Image: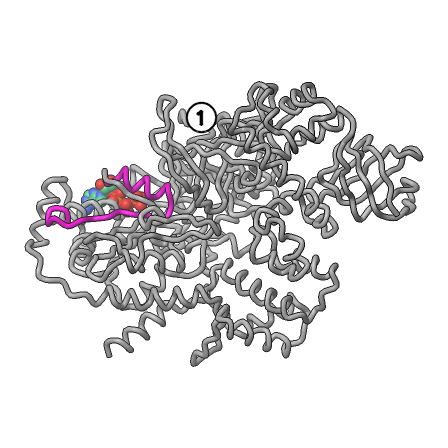
Amino acid sequence: MIIEGIVEEIIFRNETNGYTVGRLNTSDGEVTIVGYAAFLKTEEMVQVDGDWIYHNKFGEQFNFTNIKTLVPSTLKGIENYLSAGLIPNIGPKTAKKIVEKFGLESLDVIQYTPEKLKEIPGIGDKKLRKIVEAYDEQRELRDIMVYLQQFEITVNYGTKIYKKYGKDTIKIISENPYRLSEDIFGIGFKTADKIANKMGIENSSPYRLEAGLKFVIMQCAQEGHSYVPKEEFFNKSKHLLGIDEAYLEEALRNLALKNTIYIINDEEEIKVYYAPFHIAENNVAKKIVELSRVDFDELEVDIDKAIHRIEEKDEIIFGQKQKLAIQESIENGMMIITGGPGTGKTTIINAIIDICENLGMKVLLTAPTGRAAKRMSETTGRESKTIHRLLEYSFMESEEMAFNKNEESPLEADVIIVDEASMIDILLMNSMLKAVNPGTRLILVGDVDQLPSVGAGNVLKDIINSGIIKVVMLDEIFRQAEESMIIVNAHRINKGDKPLLNGKDKDFYFISLKSPQEIVSTIIDLIKERLPNFYGVDPIKDIQVLSPMKKGEVGIFSLNRCIQDALNPKAEGIEEKKIGDEIFRVKDKVMQIKNNYSLEWKIICDGDAIETGEGVFNGDFGYITDIDNEEGTVKVLFDDNKCAEYDSKQIDELKLAYATTVHKAQGSEFPVVVMPIYSGPPMLLTRNLLYTAVTRAKQLVVLVGEVRYMDMMIKNNIITRRYSSLDKKIRNFLNVFYS
Ligand SMILES: Nc1ncnc2c1ncn2[C@@H]1O[C@H](COP(=O)(O)OP(=O)(O)OP(=O)(O)O)[C@@H](O)[C@H]1O
């Protein structure tokens, strides 16, 4: 049954899935309508298709399964339609001006004679072009949204899906809804499966099984595994798909035939790999063997003498292992230097640079994250780039990212020094090694006891375990103990000893509290009042709250809300914007949570852009400097002075970052770290997580909670196993090539 009317009122809306209850004024009087229509606005003229139902509490309602917006016919309706924020560049003020000028003709003007819009002050050629494009897109989008809403897809995802598939959206989804889980960031197999189910796609459909298997293998990769043993893989898949193993065998075979998945029959187990990880592991293993076997000509320098020269110049005496690290780095094609904080890694990097540059060698410096690269630049006084920038990433139309530096166009350098190497995952290592020519010395510096990389693989540890690369493990602390309890305690934690707490005038404190409410309120008091008053630090810029968890009272979601309320509350004149469950305000501290290779940025100095570029990366911290609800944009100033503008489709790549997880803080350092210590899942409360958190702080660590949970973390040295066979492959290739 179909009814038409004007929306009088939106009574309720679930912002996440768009479920809406509204009052519709029809020619037969007012009716209550219910259904999925996230776009629905008052004053809109709509046609709904559905059935009457009876609700015990609310009485008779019209439950619609399809809704179509008819072109609004009242002035208010047109204004509401235009100001809904769906057309970038038209916000409430511009909408009002358009309707004042063109009245009931407004939509016709936009569609047929858009040139006339230039009569409105503030609309020039550029803005006009954007409005026209957006208006067309928006009409198409609305139809697609109506289609997607029957599957309970939110507006945000609907927009992303449309951006990816354009006008083919409906065709693609009705043929194979599982493509959504592969193509759309944030849509998983389960959502796609629900849609497929509504469409009546069979449980044993090959589309479903193959998508399910891919989902399982990718989930394993997200947990850090490069491969999964077949038995475990099938158990997980059976659980997800609820289907007999015979079907799985067939689907797995198909995926293997398409080279999407590799099945490797190793002596002890059958390993199932998602193709990119198998390929990356093989390439990395081969390249490492190749780099390690390069024989260099005798150098025109006595390294002992060179080291001595630096000792005199810098007035230090290198420890035995430090000397060895310097020497081996210069004499070998590949080298690993690992050690905890204060063991002299930076000092050694500087010595290596000094000696190599004195020999006329070209040295390149790099690190996996922007913050780590920036720090490397500061401590060496030379340019250091992120690995992505070093490899000259470029962004293609298909949204895929590629590196211009690769085997065809390798990095021109005699020495490449990589800091924070524990953060490099197998895919990034593969990209980097492709661009390193044998004969270039590759020196990986890091702390192997930190949390492993966020991405899959156990790269640094595996290379060390392979036993074929020269490794120096620095274990002597050179920073004075009186100077820093952070360093002393970091090493104690790493060894399994309890840290020394609350020494007078020290930099490592534990505040004992039991309840999560007290923990949270104390953390807020610390960052808002006590630490800024006592240490003169900036509550937003200098203090970082780290938590092992995302959820729960001391998890980052809840902490961010509480800290935002305390440091940057709602206030008149401060613009804010709601995205999903989060509210962003000007001044908020935020983090980019996904690599975006195409987002444009500018570095502005005295009002002029002195540098421009593209790309903002997962883990970059910044501050909101402007929210324009009229244009639907948010501006963020990042730590490295890059200023980027997000449009409404990109904003969900930002999250509040007053508190972040320890994992996200890897590779970053902060003057002050505050961390709640409370109960949580044992797989998160681990020694290397506490160690990583503590080593992020430069001046002060404050732990707040129960000592017994800290003790539990220190005891919990079971590092969850990551399935990876890089170490084995390195040894195998060595045997094959050089036996
Ligand atoms: N052989 C040495 N003799 C005296 N002091 C040293 C020696 N090696 C390093 N140091 C000093 O110890 C401190 C820590 O060294 P460095 O910063 O190089 O360590 P690091 O491993 O890079 O530490 P972090 O990871 O905390 O940055 C510095 O002040 C450095 O000058």
Ligand 1 placement by image quarter: top left
Left or right for 231, reference 289: right
Q: Which residue is drawn at 31% across and 73% down?
A: 731
Expressed as whole percent of the image width and height from the top left, the position of residue 136 reads 63, 39
Left or right for 65, reference 115: right
Check disc 1 and give the amino acid type. Pro
Tag 1, which secondary structure?
Answer: helix
Residue for badge 1: 532
Q: Residues within 10 Å of mark 1 (few under 14, many from 20)?
A: some
Left or right for 282, reference 85: left
Expressed as whole percent of the image width and height from the top left, the position of residue 38 reads 72, 40
Question: Which quadrant of the figure has residue 585?
Answer: top right
- Magenta region includes residue 196: no
Query: 179 or 476: nearer the eye?
Result: 179
Q: Give the range drawn in magenta.
A: 356-380
Say if residue 683 shows up in the picture.
Answer: yes
Left or right for 730, reference 182: left
Question: Which quadrant of the figure has residue 279?
Answer: bottom left
Expressed as whole percent of the image width and height from the top left, the position of residue 299 reads 8, 57
Tally the marks.
1
Q: Reply above or below: 412 against 728.
A: above
